[in-house]
Amino acid sequence: MWYGRAAEALQRVVDHDNHHATARTFLRNTHWGRAAALDKLARHAEAADAWQHAAEFHGSGQMRFEESLNNFGVVLRDEGILAGAAVCFRKAIELDPKYALAVYNLGVTLRADGKLDEAVAKYREAVRLDPGQADAHDQLCWSLRLQGKLDEAVAFGKEAVKLKPGEANYHNSLAYALWDQGQLDEAIAEFREAVRLDPQFAAASANLAEAELMAAMRDKLPALDKGEFTPRTTHELRAMDRYCKIKKLFLAGARMYAAAFADDPKLADDLNTFNRYNAACYAALAAAGVGNDELPPDPTQKAELRRQALTWLRADLEARAKQLESDRPEDRKTVGQWLRHWRQDSDLAGLRDGAELAQLPDDERQACRKLWADVQTLLDKAEATK
């Protein structure tokens, strides 16, 4: 590589005049280019060394080296060079283990690289080192929500808002965590605050509208149980579905879909909405006796729910078979992905897995086994090499 010779020449200039800004900039860019080239060649150890050399010439002479490393890491991350950014942040932390900002930035980089668990560990460390770092609290709120640790997510979100109450993003993050926790009214209040602080915050505005519709559907649940209300649009169905899912109201969810399908069969037939499959999952879960419905189903109702779930799954399986008849590669891929999901989805365990099937009457057990045999047959057809 020509980078080596160029670096040597520029280094001589810098050695002669350490404050030669142009030479230092060119030297940084030379090491940067060498690092990027080495990284593409999978020579990662050499690339990491080159990233470090590039960082040495980033920033002012008044800056601590670890600060220069951190700032250069941010530059690299912003340009999508995650491996190089991580090298810079780790080196900065090695030089100053209490450098909370570098720890936080490493967490952000790991999150961008899809390493959620490692990112959460770094965010926690950043908060330990600097309890006043609001960004780290906010990122913990968002990331812990993705991990399903909702109580912690809400706690960190509230602390972020407390530290920086004027930051609209923090209110939006907290609202999401409250939403997933089922605290819908509290979530709406936070979404409203995010929009108040930043009227141009499109995502928060959309979230607020969806949460308000969900609250309206929640308030319709008593009427749904009495047969006095049926969701009539996809938006209404989605809002009530999400509320039932969060609150684990599986019997209510199954009834909701049954009423909606009776009112408009097209809501069941559209494979792109997954309505009928979601309905089957609700019925299967309610039949398994799980959930938080106020009046759980009795044995007779459970048998009817299992029958209904099988009917819905059968209808979806027939629709997937017709989809496969197109013989288009994208349809074959979609059908294969969905049927593999069916075989793994824990919502359907009560109709599929051995221990659960053993508890069913013989006729139901045979019906379930026949369904899954037909699922496998269609899956084999979808995955067959053409």
Image (tube, helix red, strand yellow):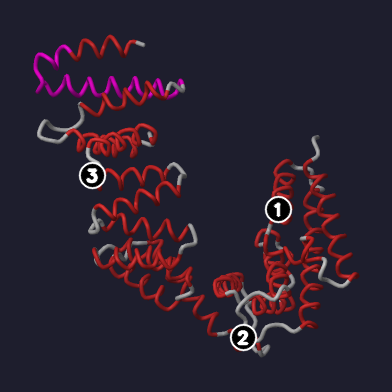
- Residue 118 is labelled as none
- Residue 99 is labelled as 3
Residue 326, percent from left and from top: 79, 46
- Give the quarter of the image for residue 296: bottom right
- Residue 294 is labelled as 2
* Total labels drawn: 3
**Real-space CA distance between mark 1 and mark 3, rounded to the nearest whole angstrom:** 46 Å
From the viewer's perspective, tell me whether residue 177 is left or right of residue 5.
right
Camera-nearest label, 3 or 2: 3
- Please name the residue that numbered disc 1 is placed on: 338
Q: Earlier in the sequence, mark 2 or mark 1?
A: 2
- Give the quarter of the image for residue 142: bottom left
Mark 2 element type: loop
From the viewer's perspective, tell me whether residue 286 is left or right of residue 28.
right
- Give the quarter of the image for residue 29: top left
Residue 199, percent from left and from top: 31, 66
- Whether the magenta-drawn stretch holds residue 16 is answered as yes
What's the magenta region?
Answer: 12-41
Is residue 308 or residue 299 the one in the foreground? 299
Residue at 66 percent across and 74 percent down: it is: 290
What main secondary structure does the magenta stretch of the protein show?
helix
Residue at 46 percent across and 23 percent down: it is: 42
Above or below residue 141? Residue 34 is: above
Q: Mark 2 belongs to which amino acid?
A: Glu
Q: Mark 3 belongs to which amino acid?
A: Tyr
**Callout 3: 10 Å neighbours few (<14), some, many (20+)?**
some
